[in-house]
Image (cartoon, rainbow, N blue to C red):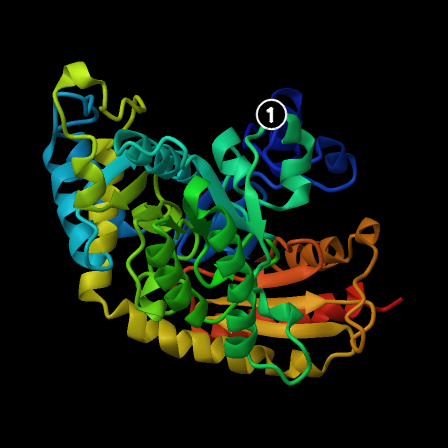
Amino acid sequence: MNMTPNNQAMMQRDLAVLWHPCTQMKDHETLPLIPIRRGQGVWLEDFDGRQYLDAISSWWVNLFGHANPRITAALQQQLQTLDHVLLAGFSHAPAIELAERLIQLAPPGLQRVFYADNGSSAIEVALKMSYHYWRNSGRPDKSRFITLANSYHGETLGALAVGNVALYRDTYGPLLMPTLTAPSPDCYHRAPGETWYDYSLRRLADMEQLLEQHHHAVAAVIIEPLVQCAGNMRMYDPVYLTRLRQACDRYQVHLIADEIAVGFGRTGTMFACEQGGITPDFLCLAKGLTGGCLPLSATLTTDTIYQAFYDDYQNLTAFLHSHSYTGHPLGCSAALATLDIFAGDQVLSRNAALAQVMRSATAHLADHPHVAEVRQHGMILAIEMVQDKQTRTPYPWQQRRGLRVYRHALQQGVLLRPLGDVIYFMPPYVITPEQITMLARVTTEGIELATRD
């Protein structure tokens, strides 16, 4: 009897016991689940031997390919010495070295690193630190947060509260703290002939008005620099970052930069904040931090904020936030190997060439009658399908046109996971120009099929 597991057998086992993230499980009555047995480079392979090009880096985490040998070797070496130790009252070499190297790489002025497990937790750390800083500084009234429309910062309750995508947020509204919302600098909404630069500046005026009115009660502004990823990959100009930093300084409000998805080279620079020439008060990192190998996050902040918590224990000013796996040695070792690849392989310059290939391979779609826009920041490219190009009228969301693209791509050996009707590329950096060309061809075919009626 052949006992080798196949897709069908694994699907049946899975659906009997698992509840998958960000999924309406009933969909799997008609949309087959794909069990993956191995990954190598940009490829994923299922239990029937079919391969899929991972064009979205498995939820934006994978930087240097699946089963990267340098990262794997670092993990194997670390496993032989230290698997885990608590980071309260104890320390270890990978956590120390990673913090040192992140501080060297980050925008100047960020001097302290607080570890957590995942991106949402990094956001929670930043929110709590900001509020707690003002409380320790005698300003407990500064307890509110300003967020951008169409923003997304994670699924835990604090992170969800400062997000603004209704699909994720609205159900849990009664559980969430109130926030202030500024219009997004999302340049998809710019006027005909208006530049990204001018539109982003115009939207900053709305943010400045909010700060003028509420700064006495605001702890921090939180943003995703340059790309609102879960918000349909909407993008804006770096001038918004530059001027927002100035406004936050003027009104004595912290700036939290959520670079969980856009950090580590995704937008063309190591960190997106660099393109605005700014240093945030908090820089939140995760996803690509370990090359996509293990869960780990880091919240970087300034020594000024750190000093507001440095006191005698009896004064109860300490930041008593913790995770069991904070600064996990394996995660830190994977992150160090990831940074070694950046240091030795001229990753950013190679990415610039790959980004140009992505731009050229999809340029024809700008003229498609059902594509409103093709937009790009570095290694993130998005294609927005619409019902009417002239008016930018979207398709009714119930039609799930993006799902048609997803299905076609799987049949052609490509993993895309559109956000509604926005198809995007965020591939591992080891993708080749030839693979990008294939990806663009499959996407074009999928768009033709999805918009045919």
In this rendering, the answer to whether 94 lies above or below 241 is: above
Residue lying farthest to the right in this orientation: 453
Q: Nearer the viewer, residue 393 or 10?
A: 393
Q: Nearer the viewer, residue 211 or 194?
A: 211
**Residue 422 at what x, y percent from top left?**
66, 61
Q: Quick one: quadrant of the N terminus?
A: top right
Task: Give the residue at x 31% y 54%.
Answer: 280
Q: Nearer the viewer, residue 427 or 394?
A: 394
Q: Is residue 165 visible?
A: yes
Q: Which residue is mark 1?
A: 175
Q: Quick one: quadrant of the C terminus?
A: bottom right
**Mark 1 closeness class: few <14, some 14–19, many ≥20 residues within 10 Å:** few
- What amino acid does circle 1 point to? Leu
**Residue 237 at what x, y percent from top left?**
48, 71
Task: Give the residue at x 27% y 35%.
Answer: 115
Task: Give the residue at x 30% y 42%.
Answer: 299
Count of numbered circles on the image:
1
Task: Give the residue at x 33% y 61%.
Answer: 271
**Residue 308 at what x, y percent from top left?**
20, 34
Q: Is residue 164 left or right of residue 297?
A: right
